[in-house]
Amino acid sequence: MASIKEIEWDVFEGLSLADKKPYLERGGGDAMPYHTLFAQQFDRSLLERLTALANRIRFINKSREGALYLKGVLAHKRAMLYFSQPSSRTFLSHLAACQILGITTGSVRDAATSSEFKGESREDSIRTFSSYFDMIIMRSPEQGLAEKMAWELSNSSRPIPILNAGSGKDQHPTQALLDIYTLVRSFENKGGLDGRTVTFCGDLLRGRTVRSLSYLLTNFRDVKQIFVAPKALRVPDDVVDVLREKAVDFEITEDLQAAVRVSDAVYMTRIQDEWDSSKGESAKIDTSRFKFGAQELELLNPDGVIMHPLPRRDEIATCCDRDPRAMYWRQMRNGMWIRAALIAATFGYENEIMNCGY
Ligand code: NCD
């Protein structure tokens, strides 16, 4: 078994994501991640196990007895939510996931309220959290920080797992898990996710959810991916390179309506203008043709779904909200179940929950 303890940071950092994966596993041969840092850690078999576990947790939680059982599973653990970038859903759904499993939580949501403000390095802050908690769930504007912290902690005297809840413009693996969970559930009784067409629309250049989900979709058979964005916000080359390497069918276009006509799922995203290098840069881009409204709803197939990681601005008109194909509300709640599944599996409780009497 590869151990992250046996490798220097600069060697680890230089590995491909596929080569990093075995260093991040829990051990014991079950292939579940110990640190969850990027979408490339999940293959189809892990995705199927996590969706089954999320379904199981969701079911058990329906009864009072079941909910109380779940609350006992990780009542001996504490988790730190360390969010130095704005968040509503990702923060709250991780918090709720911890509560379902009985985990006690602490949080820092603003670096100004932590000692980082006094000049403490992030490494020292993380070491501090690891003194009091058994897991760190972290979001940061800095690409690669979660990886660096996972390496640091694994090489410290108190190794604890890190869950990446969004890193820079780069990765958002737990969002991609909830997106896959939503897609799998949406097509569960309609022939499954294999062979479907998924359209991504919006700011595909800077949206980290798109990179992570695009990768996870490559685990399914014959899923075509269509990328719809203005030229300035086109899907980046590294995402396209992965699709080419895996011989995945994909298309890049600016015609949303044509894409909607042939899609089973449309994944809308907002313009990520917090990354603008000068104020107002994104506002100069004409995004008017990259919005989903009443006309697009007409074109979408009756079994299709509309998704969005949220928050939305005006890229999905509110007139779509009550359509049964608008999946973004359920998608949001799915985040709580799949994150509970991931956290339980990270601590090694997958089999116990799957086989419990509830
Ligand atoms: C996304 C994020 O933060 O990357 N939101 C989320 O986690 N639900 C997308 C976004 O902010 O647009």
Image (cartoon, grey):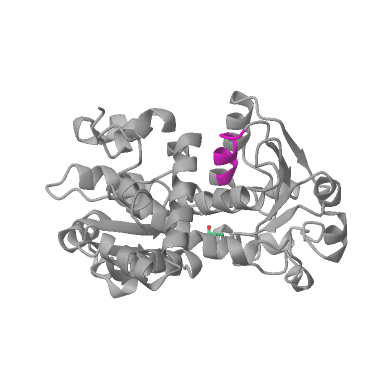
343 vs 118: above or below: above
Q: Nearer the viewer, residue 291 or 326?
A: 326
Decide which of 168, 98 is in the foreground and name it. Answer: 98
Image location of residue 339, percent across then percent down: 43, 57
- Outermost residue to the front: 357
| Ligand 1 quarter of the rendering | bottom right
Quarter occupied by the N terminus:
top left
Q: Residue at x 33, y 73 (%)?
A: 112
x then y, percent, for residue 281: 66, 60
Front-most of 336 and 5?
336
Residue 19: image x %, image y %? 38, 28
Let me know if residue 36 appears in the view.
Answer: yes
Write down the region rendered in magenta. Answer: 213-220
Residue 121 belongs to magenta span = no
Q: Residue 358: percent from the left, percent from the top?
A: 38, 59
> Which residue lies at the image location 44% right of the left edge and 55% below the top edge?
56
Q: Nearer the viewer, residue 35 or 221?
A: 221
- 81 displayed left or right of 223: left
Q: Is residue 279 visible?
A: no
**What kind of secondary structure does the magenta stretch mostly adopt?**
helix
In the visual, does 107 lie left or right of 274?
A: left
Vertical placement of 321 versus 46: above or below? Answer: below
